[in-house]
Image: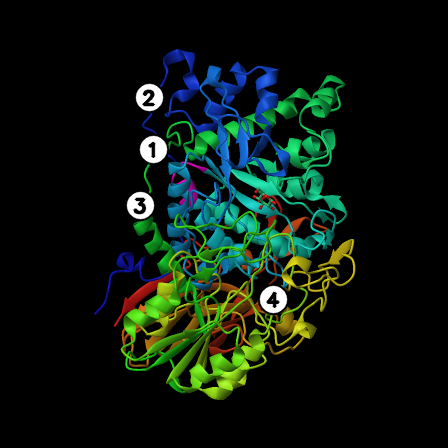
């Protein structure tokens, strides 16, 4: 059967083109408020409001208060109990600004609850931008129905270190994958008439010492790594706001960093506004002149409210021109109009939690990664008796902590675990794997908490298979000091595997951990933080009701010695039994790996990781043939055939890697396809290499340069395993820093399925 090209969008991870446009339905208020005319452009509407604003109103718009009661803050009447609140300007018909975290769901008010998506890493692991978009739509819709009009979502800092406590909020180590994933999530959120941020700009790649540390990196490496992820995500999702980060970049605080904000606003022509992170502002005039447009919760988290009296004084003295204040207000207004905040005001409305849970379930089913499956231990069969062990699997699944943590409307499935204070509480989603396994297994299913290792091993010995859930809680504000699983979990897995070699380990974690027992267990499923329906999703994967489709968006090291920085001084959190060793450093040197983040570092250093980027098993297997790289209309493309050679329907993600002339074996992911095939079925696919991955940044000339010469193209099952290789010549080309090459319009095309 040959399908038409257009009908394959659902089958393959085609990037959704986000327009950021709104279909305005609200009426106008006549000439008194001409900016309410939805036929005008967001910029024109912002200009009209600006003309009508007093200086006081402008100064009110460029700062937002804390919206919650923590830290001794007295919540303003009208605030919703969340991260940020700016009062309405009723005279002009401007609604209150109501801000909530974050990218995995509506985090606040915690008690009301919301639907939790799985980790950002799970969504990235799907290699499916349409899934990221659907997740964004879901959380945007819940946020709007809670009355929020700004979501503090869009975390896209690259994973430079598996110990970073916020990796679960991000989208992995590769700029193209992270940029397209997060850009589409942002587009999904904004389709629901909210502004979404993208954050944390930039190089907030560790939590240890985050408010003081200087992330040091050369300009070319910066532009080709984390900044490229931001650039791609911004071009894809058009976020209304960029949140500048806590840390310093090359010694200068991110929120007053001229260079960083100039790259954003000048080189990338970013029309939105820059808001600070909570407590990330250190100056008035300096930050405003560098490009910060809005101070967040300064009265609670900064030394003073810099964007009030100090900035007013700077304007009065002529240090900061009035035009800059107008630009700040205009950018904020423009983003609010562009997202449809004025035309579709956020109001309290019922939420269909059952439908939203399905979105979260699908994200987990598509994003969990099968790392090991000896002798086809998985999928399980219903006839087997099962020992379910550890990880509170009788109650639910774990969630990462900090400002992004989402609690279910049913509450926390395992309350009271440390830490009691920030960045706690430690939250579990009430979706118990044990119950879901019981629904499927006809054999006996028994549970052991794992606290008593001998009892757990005994139970495993009495069962046909053992499924051990292990967990690693991570959260904003701290990094793990090492890769080991906390507590006695390694000993638990070891004892269970000795008692029964048919042991399956399910990881609920922030990302790569050490697995000293790996060779002894039959199977390992990386479930990340599995989200609202995690228990069901994991169980469906274990029983083969869905094929594990996830591929690693991060490299899995063998141990800390393989990392660019073997230690993070000062990492840890005493209240959960991980006491920090030493003091946080003043600087973190990202020039060590530079732009060679993740798998590129391993290639450069000839290191063999435990599992490579892009790796993940399926219950079937795929074969690639007919690899034909060529240059078409000036674009580098590769066509090939993927065939499902196994006995089950499954999903594959063939990946196109490119090595630039003279790049010394360091290849880059330049595109991919995602395809679902029945047994024996083949698909003819063409991937176009994203032109943004074929250039290097020339600092001296301030240009992107595509070198002339022979480009090596490889078709990968992962970043280290290839079935298809070829060379193609391209002429030199170059683009000015403020005119970066455009992304691939159709990154994956299906020419047919047989
Ligand atoms: C985090 C941000 C978050 C903000 C508001 C900060 O601690 O770094 O990601 O959006 O708090 O809650």
Which mark's residue is nearer the viewer, 3 or 1? 3
* Residue in view at x 51 percent, y 27 percent: 333
In this rendering, would 204 be left or right of 448? right
Q: In the rendered view, would you say 282 is above or below 722?
A: above
* Residue 387 locus on image (x, y percent): 40, 78
- Residue ID for mark 4: 598
SS for callout 2:
loop
Are dots 4 and 3 in contact, CB under 8 Å? no
User: Which of marks 1 and 3 precedes in the sequence?
Assistant: 1
Are dots 2 and 4 in contact, CB under 8 Å? no
Q: In the rendered view, would you say 745 is above or below 499?
A: above
* Residue in view at x 63 percent, y 38 percent: 71
| On-image quarter of the C terminus | bottom left
Please identify the quarter of the rendering in which residue 14 is found.
bottom left
- Residue ID for mark 1: 23
Which mark's residue is nearer the viewer, 1 or 2? 2
Q: Which residues are magenta?
A: 188-194
* Residue 73 locus on image (x, y percent): 61, 33
Name the colouring of the figure.
Answer: rainbow
* Residue 181 locus on image (x, y percent): 47, 55
The CB of the residue at mark 3 lies under 8 Å from ligand 1: no
Numbered label attached to residue 27: 2
In this rendering, would 641 be left or right of 754? right
Q: In the rendered view, would you say 269 is above or below 52?
A: below
Distance between mark 4 and mark 3 Cα atoms: 39 Å
Numbered label attached to residue 352: 3
| Residue placed furthest toward the left | 1
* Tally of marks: 4
User: Which of marks 4 and 2 precedes in the sequence?
Assistant: 2
């Amino acid at each position: 059967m040959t399908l038409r090209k257009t009908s394959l969008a659902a089958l393959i991870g085609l990037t959704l083109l986000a327009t950021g446009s709104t279909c305005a339905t609200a009426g106008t208020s006549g000439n008194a408020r001409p900016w309410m005319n939805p036929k005008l452009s967001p910029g024109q509407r912002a200009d009209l409001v600006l003309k009508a604003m007093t200086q006081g109103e402008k100064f009110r718009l460029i700062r937002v208060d804390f919206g919650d009661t923590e830290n001794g803050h007295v919540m303003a009447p009208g605030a919703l109990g969340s991260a940020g609140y700016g009062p309405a300007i009723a005279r002009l018909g401007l609604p209150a600004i109501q801000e909530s975290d974050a990218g995995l769901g509506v985090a606040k008010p915690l008690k009301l609850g919301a639907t939790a998506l799985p980790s950002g890493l799970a969504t990235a692991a799907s290699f499916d931008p349409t899934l990221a978009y659907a997740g964004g739509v879901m959380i945007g819709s819940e946020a709007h129905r809670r009355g929020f009009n700004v979501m503090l979502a869009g975390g896209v800092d690259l994973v430079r270190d598996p110990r970073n406590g916020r990796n679960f909020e991000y989208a992995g180590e590769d700029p193209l994958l992270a940029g397209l994933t997060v850009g589409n999530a942002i587009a999904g959120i904004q389709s629901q008439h909210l502004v979404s941020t993208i954050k944390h700009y930039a190089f907030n790649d560790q939590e240890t010492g985050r408010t003081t540390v200087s992330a040091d990196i050369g300009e070319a490496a910066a532009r080709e790594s984390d900044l490229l992820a931001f650039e791609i995500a911004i071009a894809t999702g058009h976020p209304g706001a960029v949140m500048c980060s806590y840390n310093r970049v090359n010694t200068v605080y991110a929120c007053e960093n001229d260079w960083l904000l100039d790259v954003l606003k000048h080189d990338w022509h970013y029309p939105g506004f820059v808001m600070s992170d909570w407590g990330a502002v250190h100056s008035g005039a300096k930050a405003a002149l560098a490009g910060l447009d809005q101070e967040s919760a300064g009265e609670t988290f900064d030394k003073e409210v810099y964007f009030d009296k100090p900035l007013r004084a700077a304007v009065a003295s002529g240090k900061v021109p009035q035009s800059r204040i107008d630009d700040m207000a205009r950018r904020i207004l423009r983003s609010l109009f562009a997202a449809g905040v004025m035309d579709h005001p956020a109001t309290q409305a019922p939420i269909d939690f059952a439908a939203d849970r399905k979105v979260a379930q699908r994200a987990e089913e598509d994003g969990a990664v099968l790392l090991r499956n000896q002798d086809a231990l998985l999928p399980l069969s219903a006839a087997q008796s099962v020992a379910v062990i550890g990880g509170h699997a009788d109650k639910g699944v774990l969630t990462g902590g900090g400002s992004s943590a989402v609690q279910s409307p049913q509450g926390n499935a395992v309350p009271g675990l440390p830490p009691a204070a920030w960045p706690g509480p430690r939250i579990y989603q009430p979706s118990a794997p044990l119950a879901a396994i019981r629904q499927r297994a006809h054999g006996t299913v028994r549970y052991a908490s794992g606290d008593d290792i001998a009892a757990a091993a005994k139970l495993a010995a009495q069962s046909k298979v053992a499924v051990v859930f292990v967990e690693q809680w991570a959260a904003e504000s701290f990094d793990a000091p090492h890769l080991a699983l906390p507590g006695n979990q390694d000993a638990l897995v070891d004892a269970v595997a000795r008692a029964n070699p048919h042991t399956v380990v399910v990881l609920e974690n922030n990302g790569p951990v050490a697995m000293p027992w790996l060779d002894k267990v039959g199977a390992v499923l990386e479930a990340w933080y599995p989200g609202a329906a995690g228990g069901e999703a994991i169980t469906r994967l274990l029983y083969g009701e869905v094929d594990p489709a996830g591929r690693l968006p991060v490299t899995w090291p063998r141990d800390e010695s393989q990392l660019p920085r073997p230690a993070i001084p000062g990492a840890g959190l005493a209240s959960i039994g991980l006491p920090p060793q030493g003091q946080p450093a003043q600087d973190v040197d990202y020039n060590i790996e530079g732009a060679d983040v993740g798998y590129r570092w391993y290639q450069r250093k000839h290191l063999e990781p435990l599992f490579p980027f892009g790796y993940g098993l399926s219950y079937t297997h795929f074969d690639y043939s007919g690899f034909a790289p060529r240059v078409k209309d000036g674009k580098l493309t590769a066509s090939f055939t993927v065939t499902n050679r196994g006995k089950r329907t499954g999903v594959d993600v063939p990946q196109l890697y490119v090595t630039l002339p003279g790049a010394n074996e360091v290849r880059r992911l330049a595109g991919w396809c995602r395809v679902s095939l029945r047994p024996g079925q083949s698909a003819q696919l063409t991937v176009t290499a994203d032109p943004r991955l074929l250039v290097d940044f020339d600092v001296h000339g301030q240009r992107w340069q595509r070198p002339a010469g022979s480009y090596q193209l490889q078709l990968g099952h992962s970043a280290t395993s290839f079935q298809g290789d070829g060379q193609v010549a391209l002429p030199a080309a170059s683009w000015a820093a403020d005119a970066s090459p455009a992304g691939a319009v159709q990154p994956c095309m299906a020419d047919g399925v047989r």
